[in-house]
Structures are given as structure tokens and as C-alpha cells.
Amino acid sequence: MAVRIAPSLLAADFTRLGDEVRAVAAAGADWLHLDVMDGHFVPNISFGPAVIKALRPVASLPFDVHLMIAPVDAYLEAFAAAGADHIALHPEAGPHLHRSLQAIAALGCKPGVVLNPATPIESVLTVLDLVDLVCVMTVNPGFGGQAFLPGQMAKLAALRRAIDVSGRAIALQVDGGITAATAPLAIAAGADVLVAGTAVFAKPDYAAAIAALRPVASADLGR
């Protein structure tokens, strides 16, 4: 199983974001994860489409945009225009998840659904035909650097089985507390995209930090 590494820009040095994006791209990142927070849906504020637009010419990495904002529908077009490749949202961020996912696809982006620790998997099972990505939060969203919640592995494994049954090429992402120590748990449960924030950006050598995840990510874990 090929596992992709998606460094989270939330953990980067915000005084030099362009250089940070170039650095993780050169270090071998597969995607760039961009956490958008509004101070309402989650208790923090990060950045919006203007920052994503400014960073888009810096690297050719897929931009994996995680919207932690509500209501979300009015902003989908702005993030697509800014250069998002994937746009993932929470079921709780709007009244009609099905319609929101259709809108993302119509904008030319890959739709995704993000499940908070307390959000049941049933929230996404009825829209698997519309998504290209499902993300399981292994922390409560809003802040980087939180401790990994191992209790989410049962949810991750259940989603892996549902995705396999669907026959669709849906990425199964895990976000929160991912390190070289916790990555094997997520991969064993079925994750194939790892979002890593401080595990990459808090290290002095980004290439070494990503390489430290890759042996775990590349191991044959029986899948």
C-alpha cells in the first residue's frame, strides 16, 4: 500500500511560508495540507484563500485544503479559485453535505469529508459515491501539536472496510498527532495519507523527518 505524506502548513514558520512550502516539496512531500480555521467552527483562526492563492505558484504539490469553517458553502468557490486540488469539509459545517460535495466537484476539485473524533462514520457512508477523500481526525480540530487519540483506530478500520467494499479509489487520511511512533497504528488500521505537522515542520531537517515516516509508511503491513 503506497502511503502519501502531507505536511500540514499550520506547523510551518508563518514568517516565511513560501520558503517552507518549497522546502517540504524538495524534501519529498506528496501533498501539502492546508488547515483553514474560522474561529467559529473551531477555536482558532489560521488563513484563507488569499494565502493559498499566493502559495499556489510556489510548488506543484497537490494542495489538500481542509475547511474548518461554518457555514462552508459560500466559500467553496473562493478556495477552488485560489488553487485547491482537494477540498474537504465537515458534515457539521452545512445543512446539506451531499449538495456541498457536488458543488466541490463542479468546481473541478476533489471532494472530501472530515470526521471529528465524536462524528460517527455513518455521516460519510451515504456519500462515499461522491468523495475522493475521507479524513479521520485523531485530535480535536483547532490546534496543532495535540496528542494522538488511539481510540479513533476502530473508526479508521471500519472506514477502510467500507471504502474497499465500495470499489472506489478513495484516499483514507488521518490527521492529528502523527509521528514516526503513531504512524504505524494509523497505517495498520488502513490509512494511506498521513498528515504530519510538527513531525515535519518542527524538525531541523525536513527530508529526514519525512524519510523517518516513509519506512513505516512503505512497510508491508499485510494489506
Image (spheres, grey):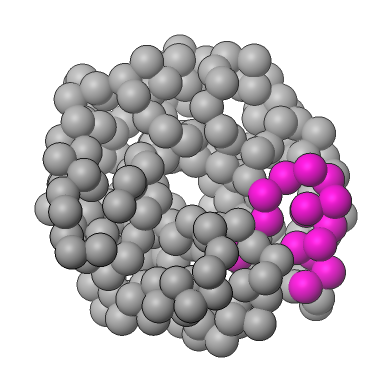
Indicate whether residue 53 is drawn in magenta.
Answer: no
Location of residue 200 by image quarter: top left
Picture coordinates of residue 36 (x, y %)?
A: 61, 46
Location of residue 159 by image quarter: bottom left
Which is more toward the observer, 143 or 200?
Answer: 200
Picture coordinates of residue 24 (x, y %)?
A: 38, 23
Q: Is residue 30 above or below residue 109?
A: above
Q: Is residue 124 above or below residue 175?
A: below
Q: Is residue 41 visible?
A: no
Quadrant for the C terminus, please: bottom left
- Residue found 33% across the figure and 47% down from its top: 3
Picture coordinates of residue 109 (x, y %)?
A: 72, 45
Q: Is residue 188 left or right of residue 47?
A: left
Count of picture labels: 0
- Residue found 36% across the figure and 40% down from its top: 5
Picture coordinates of residue 13 (x, y %)?
A: 41, 25
- Residue found 75% across the figure and 31% down from its top: 82
Q: Is residue 72 visible?
A: yes
Which is more toward the observer, 114 or 47?
Answer: 114
Indicate whether residue 100 is drawn in magenta.
Answer: yes
Q: Is residue 45 above or below residue 187?
A: above
- Residue found 84% across the figure and 57% down from its top: 103
Region rendered in magenta: 98-116
Q: Is residue 10 left or right of residue 64?
A: left
Which is more toward the observer, 82 or 134?
Answer: 134
Location of residue 146 by image quarter: bottom left
Q: Is residue 161 above or below residue 215?
A: below
